[in-house]
Structure formats: structure tokens, C-alpha cells
Amino acid sequence: MGPASRGASRRRVPRDSEVIESAVEDMESQENKDIPSSKKRRTGAQDGGLLPPVELSQAQLYKEPTNEELSQMKETENLFHSNLLRMQMEELLKEVRLKEKKQQRIDAFLHKIKQRLLTVPSTKVTEMTDQSWLPKDVRVPFIQKPYSVKGRFQFLPPTQVTVVGSYLLGTCVRPDVNIDVVLTMPKEILQDKDGLNQRYLRKRALYIAHLGHHLSRDPLFGSVRFSYTNGCHLKPLLLLRPAGKDERLVTVRLHPCPPPGFFRLCRLLPSKNNVRTTWFWDKTIPEEGKGVLDTPTPHYNTLLLCDEVMESHLHLLSAMLASSPGLRDGIILLKVWLRQRDLHKGVGGFSGFIVSMLVAFLVSSRKISKSMSGYQVLRNALQFLAATDLTVNGISLCRSLDPSLPALADFHQAFSVVFVDPSGYLNLCADVTVPTYQQVQHEAQLSMAMLDDKTVDGFQMLLMTPKPMIRTFDHVLHIHPLNCLYAACRRLKMWSELLDHGGDYVAAILPTLTTLLERGLGSRLILLTHSRAPVPEWEINQNPPKHKDWGGLTLGLLLRPEGLVSVLEMGPEADHPEATDFRQFWGPRSELRRFQDGSIREAVLWKAESMAEKRLLPHQVITHLLKLHVGIPESYVHYVGGSLDPLIRVPKETHSTGEEALAMVVRSYDHLSRQLWGLKGLPLTVTSVQGAHPALRYTDVFSPVPVWFDHTFHDHLEKRDALLPRSSKPCPAFVDPINVVCHLEGSGQWPQDADAIQRVRAAFQLRLAEVLSQEHGLQCSAKASHTDVYKDGYVFRVRVAYHREPQILKESCTPEGMITLRDTPASILLDRDTRQLPQLTSALHGLQQQHSAFSGVARLAKRWVRAQLLSDGLTEESLDLMAASLFLQPAPFTPPSSPQVGFLRFLSLLSTFDWKNNPLIINLNGELTAEDQAEIHSHFLESRIRLPVMVIATPQDRNHSLWTKDKPSAQILHHLVNLAAKALSVLENQLMTPSKSGDIRMVFRPALDVYDVLIRLNPRHIPRHREAVDLPAASFSRGLLQSADSSPRLPVLCYDPPSLYLDQLRSPQSSLCVQMALSITSL
């Protein structure tokens, strides 16, 4: 048998069924015998597992570095950004490798399996269609359609049992340890023509069915189940797991294979046919398909070739890894890289075996040296994948010059991706589709960029951060149930493809499907990929699952933001030959249109007015093309792209998510800004006008809307010339003033006393109101601290600022008469409101211009935090900055193009970021260099004890974390992290399970059972009750008019009874009611 220790596996490959003894273990045991018992005790763990300090002599302490140490330091300098990255890689390798004790238990389990396999009783010779000899509690793990097949079958014990794959090579990766065991079937079982019409494959299935029956009764095994090899329904395998506490230790996969040389390789060329049309279709093919000739079956031939050359691949890899620990480490790191991206799973996955063979190719082509470290191997392999397109230029491990071997062009004609093995007959990437390989390329390119970026934690992003499909791609669509794809294959007359894939209609139509959608989405699409349901497992007394029972087919769309805004597909001019093809592709949606340049072209116009509808244009394109060309009804396409949009939708708005309303606010602000710049009646010139409100950076959850009040809802207070809401009417609509900071030029006339400056500013506020009224006819209301301006239905709160005022507030006089500068609460607050906040608003406004999804992501994040009743625990600015980080530092992803995926990444960031040991650095406008960021991190480590629990650094606020200085508290942050982790898990499961219609709002509903008292408020007195997560059934008039009135008075501002009630409950007189009051905000 083939199980061996890691040391033995590196020296040679088993060639018979004998057990390979572990020479390394013998050496270690001999060394241990030579060590005195006293030294053994000293070398053991001390003080709870800590090793004692090593004492070095003076000579050893100042000893010159060896050549190996110099080589390591040089490699660290050239290849790693820091010595930390090297240590992280080494620590990861220790974690994912099998421990010695577990390996010994696995070896013992494999020995016992071998003994049982060799003693399974034989059966009589029967026809393959006569399966009466099988017990009733065992089902053949094969979909036998058609049932009739020639040939005889007899079970005989395997002639050889050999461990193959990563376990024997030392490249096995935890936690899912799978060991492949090849069972060489006796030649007496097989017949010369078993390569035809699935005869060999069905004999494999009967072979493991008989094995499953006998092994399932053995107490050694806790689980005996069937599954498929890489998800291929034509190649079932038997899964064995140990009983008792070791049930999750390992899964042994039994692969029956023919004896060496059984198949003639020339019969398995990509151009050969080995499944006869008349046999496969029998009487099920329609009349129009009966004339189909016996077309080549390259994928079917690949299944037979894999079993024929499996052990030769093991010999190749074993010889390569025998004396190259760096290559072994590199393969392990590549497997971890694939696993974090889900690229290795299921049918057509880019498996760990393919990666191992790729490393062998790079070694043979001298692009990787056997002396390289694991990191060098990883980097060179990723560089090769990023730069090489195997869909166009295939590669081959075959060095033979035999003219009878197929050429690479022959493989390209039969397969989408080409990587030929050393035999020259097998394409290792036969099942890999073009989208899958394009995803591998895309991820490799992103990974190389991360490794070259000194500001990114390459190790964390490359090898430690998972990238599930729902969090990687902007939109996801599920085709479910799958039986619609079989009807599509029949409609497209894909008889040859179905024949080649053994009836797997999903695999048969997938290339056609992805090509169709890629052409239709065009410039909107960066990358399209697909994912099938996980490979199923089933009990030996159950029938194998049919294709329609596997779940659904999932497609992921990585979208190009700039392509989403276009609602027009412009085609060729009407008299061009390409116009016919354009009309055929788009069907009735194509129509002739005249354009401004006078040309008449074919064009397709999609219906989308708001930004939310434009983001979902791919949904319209996909459903139209699938129905037109493939015949898949819209009800079978479950599109997941705007599932969270209703949560940020403006009340009473059905199509928009608020971007248009926010743009209206910004336009009105821009006009007011120009008016302020042009004022002539002020004593001093306006030097800058800056916004300081969430709406002006597109992050207000619900945008301010133009309001014109019905004054019958108010009483007039004549003494103050103001309005007071009437108690007999419902509470009027909530009006939030939009903050604007207006800086005036410096002048020698400004006083140098803080109190005097405030009085001068108050005078400017009064003068500002007068001038705006006189020059522009705006309604204004002046206060000592601000001026409210009523414009276009919005209320702008303009605050006059003097740039030296914060510095004057810092000044203090010592007893000796010296002037010192020291931050005071007043100076910090003033600087934040008049300088920092406007700068942040301006930067985030610019970010929105670059990434249109930023607004939706930030607003969803705030919506979720508020829904958890924690809005008082974090500042709005800190949440905006966390959302901005997803666009400015998106690694390992690309910047999100939809609010949905951005919100999922926000939850992931909040729940997984190491807030205790790292600052979150937001590089606004790219102002921070790598050295700046290193300095921020260094200062963070030095000052950690004095900094808040959540530290967010920006170019303007590098060391103080202004926006998280006062909140959140440690308890609030801990609670938020836990909530985000749970919400992320629930939400991703809902979005990836189309068959389960879950309530997407569930993660936005707070848990109220933790409160002792709940206070229910009358909805008449809640002006924003329609902004609740669950829309209320009752609605009240809030005293709004449809158009502007001529009243000279401003509306009532900031009147929100629930908030005012909370303030009273939180006052010192009601301090015991704070926790009780928090539950009001969601009602």
C-alpha cells in the first residue's frame, strides 16, 4: 500500500502494495535514545509550554552570519516588504501542514483500509445489466441512462492499493484532509472494448458499489458514502471516514483504475469518438437529431485518460519534490490561495492538482528553480498565471517529438483551456471553462498588485482573507431549477455536447451561456464567472442525485461602473452587413434610430431613469437574452443585485434609492455657494464656502427633500415672529438644516480676543442675512451663531468662520506672561466643525464622483447601525470613512460597483478588522505615501494606551482619530463586531440560496428582548415614522404643500419629538432610564 510518512514520500514513490517504512521516524527515534533523560526533561515545555531562554556566549552572540543567513536576509530584502511577511508565511505553513501525531493516526487508518480491501469477497461473472447480485440496500452510484450496455462484470479484489496525491507528496492542506487511494482493478474484470459507451465507467461504479456494501458493515468506518470525482457524475468514488473521535480527521477517497497500459492512448485522442450516438440516445432523441454523426468525445476520452496516467503524474511530482522543500511550500501556499477564492471547488475548478502540475511545468521550463523558497514559487506562479492566457496559447509538459501525438492546435479545437500532461494525450484543464480561467487570471493580477504595494498587508489579503462569490462580485444571478437548461440544450440541438458530457446538460450549455451573456453585457462587464452547487455526497442505499437536484447554477458579474450609466446599445449603421447580426442578436429590442450626427443606426434602448435602475440594467439584458436565445423564462432567473435597495429608498419612492434627491441638494448648494461668493454688501470678502452636512457628501440615509409647509399646521408666535406646531395636528415633517461653513478673509480689523471674535461673527451673521435678502431675495433668519437660508425648499444653515479663531482659543497666558498654545475643548470643537468636517465632506464628495456606489454603501452602513439602536455609539463621520476605505483600499477585492456588495464588505470589515492592534488608515485623495502610513502605524503602537478603541487615520487627522475620539466605547464596539459577524453570515446565506425566500430585512431588525421596558410612541408624533425598516400601515399628513408658498417665515427646524424625549430621559434627572430609552429609536 502507499501510505507513508512525509520523509519517505520525499524519497521515492510506492510501486507495489507494500508499506513504505518511515526512515525519518527511525532516525528521530534513534536520536532520542542517545539523549540523556535529564536533557529530555530540560528540552520539554516549561512554564505552561514556554521554552527556556537560550544562553549564548560572547563569541556566539557576535558571530558572523553564515552564507545561508546572508542569503535569507538578501531574499527578505529583495522579495519581502518586511521580515514580518516572511515569518507570517512560515507560520502559515506550520498551521496548514499535518501534524506528526495526526499523520501517524492516518497512516494506521490507511493500513487497516488496505487489509479490508484485499479481503473483500469476489462475485460471479454476470452481464452488466444483470445487477440482481447487489444487495437491496445498495444502489449503483451511476445514472444508468441508457440502461442497456454490453459487457460482463465480476468483482475481484484489487491487485494493488496505492496512495496518490497530496498526502504522499507532502502538500496536503488542512483542515479538510482528503487522501486519494487508487485501487488497481484486475485485468480479468475488464474487456478490450470497455472504453466504448461508458462500459469502463459503469464497471467502476459497480466495483465501488460492491466495496461500499462490505465496508459499510465494518465498525472501523464511521461513514461510508458515495460522491463524484471533481463533481463529474460519470466518475463516482467511495468516501471512507474513521469511526469515533477521528471521524473528522480524514476522508479517504477510493478511485478504481485500470491496470497500466490497458487503454490504447491513440484511441483516446481529442478527435476520436468513443460514445456511439445510436447507443446513447437510443429512442429518446427527436427526429431532427437522428441524423447526427458520431462526433468526437474529447471530454469523455479525458475521463478514461485520467485513470490511465494517474500514477505517472505521481511519479513526476514525487521526483520534482524529492529534494525541494521550497517547491513543496510553494504548492501549499498556492492551494491556500485557491481555497480562499473558492477556485478549486466543483466541476471545472482550478484544482490543487492542476496547480502542482503547473509548478512542474514552470520547473521544466526553468521559470522556477528547485532552490527557490515557497514565497518565490508562489510569486512566480502567480506572475505566470497573470501574464499567460491558456485559452489562446496552451502549454505542454510533453517533451516527446512523436509526430503521432496531437498538437496544441488539436487540443484548442476541442477544449477551452489547454494544459497538456507529459504523456501528450491528456489535457489537464479539460473541464476548466474560459470564465473560470479568466477569474484565475484576474485574481493572479490582483494578487501581484497587492504583493508589489507596500501599503497593503500582502499576507493578510493574499492568504488569509476569504473571497466568497457573493462578496467578490457586484451582482449574482441564480438559474433555478436546472431542468430549464435541459430544455435549452434541446432547443439549441446540442446533441454532440450532451453526448460528450454524458447527459450533463449544465456542463454542455455552460460555454454557450457565458459567451452569450459576455457579448450582451459588453462594456458593462469586467468579469463573468460561474459556480455550481457543491459536489454532493449520499448514502450507499440512495440513488445518485440527478442534475436537477444539485441546486442551481450561479453566475457572478464584476461590473464596470462607467458602463452602467449607459441605457443605449449603439449598433452598426443600417446599411452595414453587421446590422443583420445585431438585429438577430437583440431580437425585437433592436430598432432603427437617427442620431445627432445624422447617422441612422441599429440601437437598443433600455428603460432606466434613476441610478438604482441603471445599476440593475444587467438584469434586463440577461433576462432578455436568456429568453430570446435559450428559452429560459424570467421566473427561472433569480437576480441578486438590488436586494437591499428598498432599505435606502426614499419614502413613497418606488424606483430611486435617493441619489437623484441628493444631487438636487448639491445643485441647490452649489448655486447658493456662487451667490455667497458674489455678495457685494459684506465688509469682508468670502474666501471659501464649504459644505459640512452628510447630504453634501452623498451619505445622508434619507436625503433632505424640498418642503413648503401648510401653515395651518402651526400657530404663529407674534412676539418671536415664529411658528409653533399645533398639538391638534400630526407632527409636521422633519426639516434638517444643511450646514454650510463660510470663511471670511483675514483682516487687521479682526479682534484678538475670543469673546470679541464671537460678537463680530454674530454681527456678520446678521449682515449676511440682510445682504442675501436684499441681493437675492432669499428668506433668512439670523442668529448669533448661524444664519438659516430658505432656498429651493431647503434650509441651509450658514456659519461664518474666521480661520484664526481656533488658534486664539488655544492661547493661554502663564503667570510669567508667556503666551502658550494648548488644545482646549472649545478649540478642538471649533476646528472640527469649521475645518476638519468641511475638508472631509469635500473629499468624500470627490470620492462619490469617482465611485457612484459609495453613496449607497455608506447609507446602508448607517441604516444598519441605526437599526441596531447604536447610532449614538458611533459618529456619522466614522461610518462614512469606513465605507470610503472599501473604495480606497479595496484589496483583495476591486472597488464595489453596487451598494449590496459594498455593504457586505462593510460588515466584513467591521467584524474582522483588528481594531485593537491596527489603525484603519483612509488615504483620502492619495495624499499618504507608504512612509506616511508606516509612521502613522508606528505612532499608533507607541500611543495605543492613550488612543480610543477604534482608531481611524486620515491625511488631515493622522494621529488623534478625531472622529472616534469620544465614541464608540469598548462595549459598543464589541457588540457591533458581534452583530456584524452574525448579520454577514445570515445575509450571505440568504442571497446565495434562491430556493429559500428569506426576509432580507431581518438583519436590520434589532433584538428588543434585551430591554426591560419598551415605550411605544404615538405615530402621529413621529415625523419620520415612514423611515422605519418595516413600513408602517398608517400614514399621516405632515402639512406639506406641493409647491412654494409666499409665507415670509421659515419652517420649524429640527423638530423631532422622539429625539427630544430621549434627551430628557438621558438628562441627569433621568439617568436610570438611559437603557430603557434606547429602544424608542426604532419604533
Image (spheres, rainbow, N blue to C red):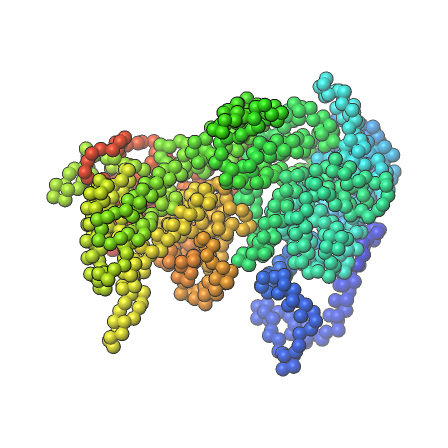
Locate residue 376 relative to residue 588 in the image: left or right.
Answer: right
Outermost residue toward the left in this view: 719
Q: Residue at x 43, y 45 (%)?
A: 848
Residue 68 is situated, as x and y percent measured from the top left of the image, at 69, 69
Q: In the rendered image, is residue 141 in sight?
A: no
Residue ID at (58%, 62%): 81
Residue 493: quarter of image: top right
Looking at the image, can residue 437 be seen? yes
Of 795 and 135, nearer the camera is: 795
Q: Position of residue 424 (x, y in %)?
A: 81, 43
Name which quarter of the figure residue 72 lies in.
bottom right
Q: Residue furthest top?
A: 287
Q: Nearer the viewer, residue 551 or 685?
A: 685
User: Relative to residue 140, is residue 619 drawn left or right?
Assistant: left
Residue 865 horizontal side relative to residue 117, left or right: left
Q: Percent x, y for residue 1042?
A: 27, 30
